[in-house]
Amino acid sequence: MLVLGLQGSPRKKGNTAFLLSAFMAEAAALGAATETVEVCRSDIRPCMELVVCEKKGFCPIHDEMESRVYGLLRQADVVVAATPIFFYNATAQLKALIDRCQTLWARRYRLKLKDPLATVRKGIVLAVAATRGPQLFEGLNLTATYFFDAIDARFCASLNYRQIEHASDMAKHPSMREDVAKLVKEHLAPLAQRPKVIFVSSADACRSQMARALVMARAGRRIEALTAGIAPAQRIDALTLATMAERKIDLAFRVPQPLNAVLAGNRPDLVVTFDAATALPPWLAAIRRENWDLGEAVGPDPDSRRRLCSALEVRIATLFQQFDIQPDTNQKQ
């Protein structure tokens, strides 16, 4: 499980950063992998309304949204947006990131593609404000509602604190740590308790990515699937992307991952390989392993990729039975 924090405050060590750090520490204690984007110190340019994303599903602006943030948003199970209130909304820097997610909105609503984690991903808002007006957080919460919808997440909770102005106010808050612990337990613990399977292939660019997407799209709330490569490719195979898009499953912005990096924060219940000769780290010898020999289904043409996808679905149905998992019949959030 990856928890992605979006730190939207211009202050490095201010109250917003303190609140987000407390949340991420609780998530890490639960066993989650965590990553934080310091939005105000990232090269994220504002939306220029070039409309390319609505036609092609990609933004033509080359910055950290392209090289890092879109991928993290797709990888994350939980996205936490943290910001001080500036004129009843998020900071300009965080708002720029949100506006650039029009690309993900377009992939969902214009191209009719669905992210495999759509039924799993949760959105959480952490906000602090110097004043105490009754409508302080209404603008932010409305923005967050549409932001989370665009990135295929469900806005499930927010923590809002008034009269937080001086540098140490958040650290001194009497209930903040208890609030954060309660929020993490309620919304992250169920995800952390899912059984975990990792699909390992040579390049992590085809079979493993397909398998993970099919598992998460069908039963992601009850099982967590990961992928890794022995020698990962730079990007997912284009034919794999096209094959999954035929099934309305969106694999754009996902990047093949090295096995050691994935295993660093994850202990799987099952390792699935696609070649019996695949060498795994010694400590994984104690983990149950299956080898799915699908060599006859792999080929360089669209029909063979479709056959591969169908063969994977048969194996995945057996996988669900092993873990006593009933897949979703309705995949809407």
Image (cartoon, helix red, strand yellow):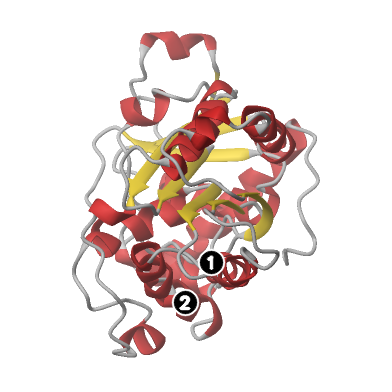
Task: Judge by depth and name the residue closer to the eye, 313 or 294.
Answer: 313
Point 33% across, 29% down: residue? 261
The residue identified by callout 2 is 107
Who comes first in sequence, dot 1 or dot 2? 2
Q: Which mark is residue 300?
A: none
Q: CA distance from mark 1 to mark 2?
A: 10 Å
Residue 260 percent location from the top left of the image: 32, 25
Task: Judge by depth and name the residue closer to the eye, 161 or 152.
Answer: 161
Residue 183 percent location from the top left of the image: 69, 38
Q: Quadrant of residue 36?
A: top left
Using the rendered image of the protein, determine whether residue 227 is visible from the camera's viewpoint.
yes
Residues packed near mark 2 inside 10 Å, few (<14), some (14 to 19) or many (20 plus) = many
Point 64% across, 45% down: residue? 316
Residue type at numbered disc 1: Ile
Task: Judge by depth and name the residue closer to the eye, 319 or 191.
Answer: 191
Residue 298 drawn above or below residue 169: below
Q: Quadrant of residue 174?
A: top right
Residue 44 drawn above or below residue 288: below
Residue 290 is left or right of residue 96, and the answer is right
Secondary-structure class at tag 1: loop
Where the C terminus falls, by quadrant?
bottom right
Residue type at numbered disc 2: Arg
Secondary-structure class at tag 2: helix
The residue identified by callout 1 is 249
Q: Quadrant of residue 320?
A: top right
Residues packed near mark 1 inside 10 Å, few (<14), some (14 to 19) or many (20 plus) = many
Residue 116 percent location from the top left of the image: 56, 58
Residue 178 is left or right of residue 242, and the answer is right
